[in-house]
Amino acid sequence: MSAPRLLAAAALAVTALAAAGCPAFHAQPLPGEPPGGSYAELLDTHVHYRVTAAAPGAPERGVVVLVHGFGATMGEWETVVPALTAAGWRTVALDLRGHGWSSRPDGDYTLDGQARLVLALLDRLGVDRFALVGHSWGSAVSVDIATHAPDRVERLALYNGMFFAAQEPLVFAWSRVPGLGEIIFDVFYPERTDEKLAFAFFDPKPYVTEALVAGTEALLDRPGTSAAALATIRALDLEALEPTYRTLDRPVLLLWGREDEVTPLEWGERLVNRLPNARLVVFPRCGHLPMVEAAIPSTRELLDFLAGAKTTTSAAGVTP
């Protein structure tokens, strides 16, 4: 590139950054916070959570903790919670730091930081032992929780997880560049919501509704969301987590959509061969959200696993 063109490109980048500004955090409770929710002040974060008791008359099986994915909320488990509670499980779901109705402080967005937040909430609730269910980036948070508190975690069910540094999309690397990351998350992150949602599904038509798009856009508009999302990407260190997989001796169920383009199946196949006590179940005609797009078979697998169905070491199966 010639010197004049290089200078022009630099000027354009500076202009774009000035126009975008720097995404700002938001440490206080969010405006419009819904009444009747449960909140706790933990580790400088206003944490939104929900505890759902087991259904009356159901056998008391224990506690399941639900950990959502990047950019999502605990609402992604709304199809799973009724089945869990009907089977006798008490569920604890929360919006992680920077997500949902939890605050967006200028704080610790590492996997360790989110893991400590979950454990702090469970301590506050008096929950000692529990099963973990995680999705996407939340699966990495769940594994981190298990490394911090191995004696408290009974088993893990992980949906379409992000586990390897090589798995990260190129935009993550771009976002770590000072200045460029601010542009990406202030200008582009809230845009084209419908296309991003559709990318998560094998067949988006039944799921990507006007209501879902509007709700997601409202979530992205909440103060501090872009800053928290950028901080989460910049703090993500999957390479440091990878050595823990071979020593994770708890039973693990990996649930994966075969047509997932966000976290392709090859990464689940790689992970199941590193975990000492794991099984991979694959759902055909399903993308990044098996709990939605394959709700009945994936929830059946989850319930069987949580009830103590035997996990086959490094075995992969495909649901019929």
Image: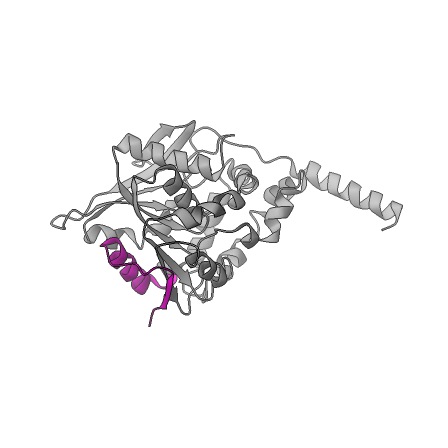
Residue nearest the observer in this picture, 29 or 111: 111
> Is 316 inside the magenta-drawn segment?
yes
How many numbered circles are shown? 0
Name the quadrant of the C terminus.
bottom left
The segment highlighted magenta reads 292-320
Residue 295 position, x and y percent, is 33, 61
Q: Nearer the viewer, residue 38 or 148?
A: 148
Q: Nearer the viewer, residue 92 or 195?
A: 92
What x and y, as percent, mark residue 22? 62, 35
Residue 167 lies, in percent from the top left, at: 54, 54
The answer to whether one can see residue 139 in this image is no
Outermost residue on the left side: it is: 57
- Farthest residue, direction bottom: 320
Position of 180 relative to 292 (above/below)? above
Residue 239: percent from left, percent from top: 53, 46
Residue placed at 50% from the left, 36% from the top?
223
Image quarter of residue 150: top left
Q: Is residue 253 left or right of residue 104?
A: left
What is the basis of the colouring in this image? one colour
Residue drawn at the location 65% of the way across and 35% of the way down: 21
Q: Which image quadrant for residue 12?
A: top right
Answer yes or no: is residue 130 visible: yes
Q: Residue at x 42, y 63 (%)?
A: 257
Residue 221 counted in the magenta span: no
